[in-house]
Amino acid sequence: MTPVKRTIVVGCLVFVLGACSGLSPTPPPTQPVGASQSPAQSSSAAPTNPPTLAGNLTIWHTFEADSPGVARGVPEALGAALNLVRNENPQLNLTVTQVSLGELFISYQLQAGQGSPDAVFAPNDNLGDVARAGLTTDLSGSFTGDDLSNFSPLAIDGSTIAGKLVQVPATLRTVGVYYLTDRIPVFPATTDDLLSAVQNGSIKLGLSQAMYPLFGFWGAFGGQLMDADGKCIADTTGVDQAYAYYAALKSAGATWYPEPDGARMVADFDSGAVDAIIDGPWAGDGYRDAHPGTLAVAPLPAGPGGAAQPLIGVDGWVINPHSANGALAVAFAKRMTQPDILAILSGQAIQVPANPNVQPSDALAAQFATAAQSGVPRPQMPQLGMFWGPFGNALNAVVDNAADPHQSVGDACAAMNSANGL
């Protein structure tokens, strides 16, 4: 039983744990990935003696051309990287299938026991669920010393479940502040300075009324979501201060866009009605088209509690433990995460390399790499699934109805713990 190809918004599903539902009994069509292209220019040299890979591998990936949730150029960049590896290894036979993210992990969990696919390249949305189901290979023994030094701590943490490395990290996803440099020469570095700029009208800020893009402000006020056991502790940290800041931004004149009104925020930023918004790399090419030469990305501002801490998602390779080609799949994943390959992904598309030594040649990708430095890995605990609803409701209550931030956060935390049986 395998998935049906379907267009989805990856940029939204990255935020939802266990959001997949439904399954098709028909196998997906196998299709080539991208056309032959020249690798992106980079200071990262190709391996002197790349390993020789020989044999058959079936891999799935989730990057579909023209999907609104995939950064422009990602499918083509992945295709260029795969073609490079194919050309290096003429005895390597790759069967590559694009599968929508909404179908991939459910289908993988049903089919992996049969030994196929050998590897999956996808965001780590459901990595925890897949690992707890016993459908990831423990890579801890295959990636040690120099191998691990090629990845940032964020990338390793986001690929580790219960102390085991279960994904080979390739790229990172986070949010940053898109702003127009002809109006805002330097974006404010602190929450106080941003609030003042919104109050005096020098920044016309637009904010999506959704938890994922706003989560990073929690860290700026010392806020934390869960303890090591998955219990919500937001009511005893600085999260209520972050919610009070959301209310202050509205009072100062920021424009809020309730879900699912994201299209209006995009249109207002494209037209210049607002000149700063929070969004991810998947949207960058459209904004660059609307504002050629005047678009930049800044980190979310720091606050009294320290640096902002946006959630970090990790795209990487999961190896099927039931694959008869496991050793080859691991060697292939290692090759697909070496500097020259990551330079292609971050040069032809807005992607942040999991290797911090790879400097993206795309300007926005480089700026997102800076924005990601203070982020926190997206939690892989099952309790996260009960976070979005209660805290989204609390956000709406505070922004729309001037509800008390402390009470709203306390109620949300209690609801999350109750739903999780804690």
Image: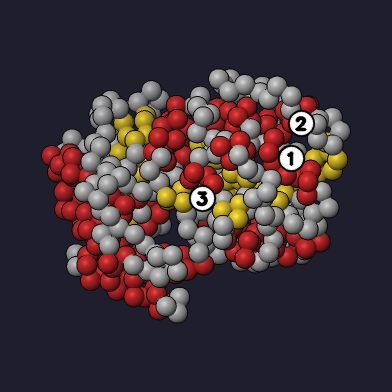
For disc 3, the marked residue is 157
Q: Amino acid at mark 1?
A: Ala
Mark number displayed over residue 51: 2
Q: Amino acid at mark 3?
A: Asp
Q: Quadrant of the N terminus?
A: bottom right
Q: CA distance from mark 2 to mark 1?
A: 8 Å
| Residue 29 visible from this viewpoint | no
Q: Is residue 158 left or right of residue 364?
A: right
Quadrant in the rendering for residue 212: bottom left
The numbered mark at residue 331 is 1
Across and down, in percent, residue 10 comes to: 54, 50
Residue 7: horizontal and vertical position, in percent? 61, 51
Residue 157 locus on image (x, y percent): 51, 50
Q: Residue at x 35, y 26 (%)?
A: 294
Q: Nearer the viewer, residue 284 or 212?
A: 212
Distance Cα–Cα, label 1 vs label 3: 21 Å
State yes or no: discs 1 and 3 in contact (Cβ < 8 Å). no
Q: Nearer the viewer, residue 16 or 114?
A: 114
Secondary element at tag 1 = helix
Q: Work out which residue is located at the far left of the displayed protein and give it.
A: 200
Please tell me which residue is depicted at 86% across the width and 33% down the height of the picture. Answer: 91
Hey, what amino acid is under mark 2?
A: Pro
Is label 2 in a helix, a strand or a loop?
loop
- The span from disc 3 to disc 2 (Cα, nearest Å) is 27 Å
- Of 255 and 329, nearer the camera is 329
